[in-house]
Amino acid sequence: MQQLQGIIPVMLTPFHANNEIDYDGLRRLTDWYIDNGADTLFAACQSSEIQFLSLQERIKITETVLQQTNNRIPVVASAHISDNLDDQVEELTAIYHTGVDAVILITNRLDVNNQGTAALKQHFEQLLVRLPKDIKLGLYECPAPYRRLLTDEEISYFAGFDNMLVLKDVSCDLETVKRRVELTKNSNLKIVNANAAIAFEAMKAGSQGFSGVFNNIHPDLYAYLYKHKDSQEPIIQELAHFLAISGAAESFGYPNIAKFMHTKIGTFKHYNSRVMKDELLVKCWAVEDLLNHIMQASDDFRKKLNLK
């Protein structure tokens, strides 16, 4: 069974100036993630702007990432955005046929009208009978269009399926992460926290890595933190504080702020997105200065940790 854990970047989608997908930039970005400590790649996710991509684009993005990764690390993908069952079957089956290591279900698409556990289970079971029998699955509590957190009962339910491999946890609550780790300890379902503020504590509590948005800025530092989560060295706690504080910059125009960094280091040329219509440097005051501080401090930590 493939292990889907560790540092799992939620991948960006680079665009040309005309908002068409920059596939060459996506290939360079894929290599950048792998070169900087990624253990698994999460393509066609919310950070990829899937709500603003056609199904054909979601499929081609996933295929491009798989081709560029070339079996170096696992790749998972979602593309799960539709409301009705038939459309969901189509998009999930299409992603399965790309050859990804797991197809990620978005929890709010399993309970579109937020009706509760019975509705979620019924929808999932209707999906399951129509999806390929050998499909490997994961779950993502995607915040859009609304954040559908799983209950303890639902966590235990999904942990009962041997082909359910990973949950990208968006509870943003350490006690919830701890409880979920305990609920899934005898299953194949791994809990991977996505919140920067609790990343270090969640790792120590049993979160099998980190899958937050700032894996698009400094995944190598999260990889180091995860590897040394049990260390008592002061530099590790210092690093944890820095990463938690840096994560707050997500509110400064994400995903464009992360894309802006990649234009600075040469991964691709443009930092526009389909999500954010406004010009980043106008909408978010002093965002470039903030990003420069984060990039410089990240490099300072790399030197201290002998990563550079």
Image: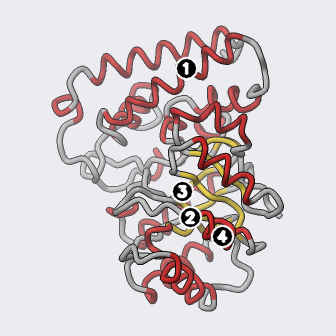
- Coordinates of residue 195 in the picture (x, y in percent): 52, 40
Q: Quadrant of the N terminus?
A: bottom right
In terms of image quadrants, where is residue 67?
Answer: bottom right
CA separation in Å, label 3 and label 1: 28 Å
Q: Measure how far apart labels 1 and 4 are at the Cα level.
A: 33 Å
Amino acid, disc 4 = Leu
Residue at 43% x, 50% y is 47
Of residue 242 and residue 260, the one placed in the foreground of this image is 242
* Tag nearer the camera, 1 or 4: 1
Q: Which mark is residue 241?
A: 1
Q: Earlier in the sequence, mark 3 or mark 4?
A: 3
- Say which amino acid is labelled 2: Thr
Residue sitting at x 68%, y 27%? 225
Please state the horizontal and vertical placement of residue 107, each as a whole percent of the image. 50, 68
Asked if the residues shown at circle 4 and circle 2 are in contact, with their CB atoms under 8 angstroms apart, the answer is: no
* On screen, residue 224 above or below 122: above
Residue 143 visible to the viewer: yes
| Residue 133, above or below 12 | below
Which of pointers 3 and 1 lies earlier in the amino acid sequence? 3
Label 3 – label 2 distance at C-alpha: 26 Å
Question: 282 left or right of 247?
Answer: left
Mark sitting earlier along the chain (4/2): 4
Q: Which mark is residue 137?
A: 4
As helix, strand or loop, the secondary structure at mark 4 comes to: strand
Q: Identify residue for label 3.
A: 43
Question: Residue placed at 40% from the left, 30% from the top?
Answer: 248
Between the C-alphas of marks 4 and 2, the distance is 18 Å
Kindly state the secondary structure of the residue where label 1 is placed: helix
Task: Report helix, strand or loop for mark 3.
Answer: strand
Residue at the spot of label 2: 151
